Amino acid sequence: MKRGARLAVLFGALLVLVGAWYLAATLSDRQQADQAEQAHGDPTDIAVGPAEEINSLAWDYFGDAVSLALEDGTWVNANDGTCPIDQNAVQDLVQAAATVSASDVIEDVTDFDQYGLADAAFTVIAATSEAVDSYTIGNTTPTGEYYIRMNGEDKVYVASATLAQAFERPLDELLLLETVPEDIDAVVDLTVETDGGMYELKYLDDASAVWHTGADPWFLMDESGQQPVRPLDTQQVEALYGLVTDLQLTQCENWNSTDLAEYGLAQPQGTALVGYLSDGGSLESFTLRFGDYVDGEVYVRLDGSKMVYRVDGKVLDGLMHPDFDAMGTLDPCALDWDKMQSMTFETEEDSYEVIRSVSTPTEADEEPEDIFTMGERSLDGSAVAAWQRQMDGLRAESRTAEAMGRDRVFAMTFRQDNEQYPEVTVEFLSYDSANYLCVVNGEEYYLVTHTAADIVMDSALSFLVELPE
């Protein structure tokens, strides 16, 4: 026989063998599936009763014994009624106990060890007013179910993982954890006391009444809490108090602490009091107390609570050591234009004085308007308004300590209806290749880019200088 013919015969034989193997494997799989279906049959209900009738749950999960009872419609810790229990979390357990069923029942068992039930460490007890059932949970089956022994019977049930997984939790995972207030509409005050001292940050509605510019409304206050020391950048203040208002209390160390000294909370190393307006408009406050550091975290509790938590130690770090110099406002020229009376602008060559007045409406629905004049010339109100917007939007790159600029490029003096600060001066001095030195009232120093300051100066000149027609 030729070689090609022999190969064809061998190939045909191989196809026959593969086909026979595939048919046998398919029949075997079908037989196994049929046998499994016949073995399982219809599910067997082994629940103690419907969810609405279950009134007691207890389990011992590897030595952590938990017992819950339903009292007046509320689930409580049967061993201590003061324990805060999360009702939603318990409902998951109730549903698991009310729906447990077996897909298979193994009768007349004498060797429970092979199912992990001889010395099982996990038992669930569920009760209604009519019955009490215990479920001892053993090993998992090859299909991911669990072997369960019920009420000490000589049977083993094969049940889904729902019951075992629902009750694989200690009491700590059922606690109703506290939260910092969630109805905060606006924070208005932050007072922090630490070993290093105390500081208070306060939101002031009328910043221009207490400072020479109407800068950001957040201020560092003096020790009395009555006088502002300096304005602070709003975004940076929000980041600071956000360490407290955004805090998530998810890791409970002790829900019933009786010895606060154990956590360094008898004499806390840090206390943060937050004053805020609630969504309803009322002035409220809450206090957090910080104890000892532990493994990069810190103990904390809400004032008046016995629950102690662990949170990231960076929370207390940030509260204890804020850099108020770096947090200073970067709005060097924010002004209250409604209080403005007159303005003087000085370039390197000329000086211009602008008077502001307000029109008197002649119609009932007419709004008063700002009128700006320079000598006998009326200025373009829209051009002045555009310059005001540029001033409001001017942001410094940074604050700086007292510094010496070179030549004065541009200066503005604002006279305003402000008893404490009737006059404010703003100067732009040449400084370096990228920035002007902006000096406010001779005591606040900022670095402002050439581009940002040039926009303000050019905008002012657009209405100050009358170009020939």
Image (cartoon, rainbow, N blue to C red):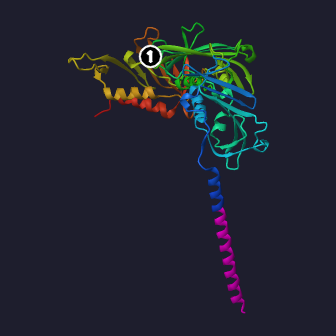
Main secondary structure type of the part rendered in magenta: helix
Q: Position of residue 301 (x, y in %)?
A: 65, 18
Q: Secondary structure at mark 1?
A: loop
- The C terminus lies in which quarter of the figure? top left
For the residue pair 111 and 185, the one nearer the viewer reads as 111
Mark 1 crowdedness (10 Å alpha carbons): few <14, some 14-19, many ≥20: few
For the residue pair 261 and 42, the one nearer the viewer reads as 42
Quadrant of residue 415 within the rendered picture: top left
Q: Position of residue 106 (x, y in %)?
A: 70, 46
For the residue pair 278 and 259, the one nearer the viewer reads as 259
Image point 58% across, 28% down: which residue? 54
For the residue pair 229 and 173, the one nearer the viewer reads as 173
Q: Position of residue 130 (x, y in %)?
A: 59, 27
Residue labelled with disc 1:
281
- The N terminus lies in which quarter of the figure? bottom right
Q: Which segment is the magenta one?
A: 1-29
The outermost residue toward the left is 363
Figure label count: 1
Residue type for callout 1: Gly
Above or below residue 103? Residue 240 is above
The outermost residue toward the front is 108
On the question of residue 335 being in view, the answer is yes
Q: Position of residue 459 (x, y in %)?
A: 40, 30
Magenta span has 24?
yes
Quadrant of residue 391 within the rendered picture: top left
On the question of residue 320 being in view, the answer is no
Magenta span has 130?
no
Left or right? Give the position of 28 relative to 391. right
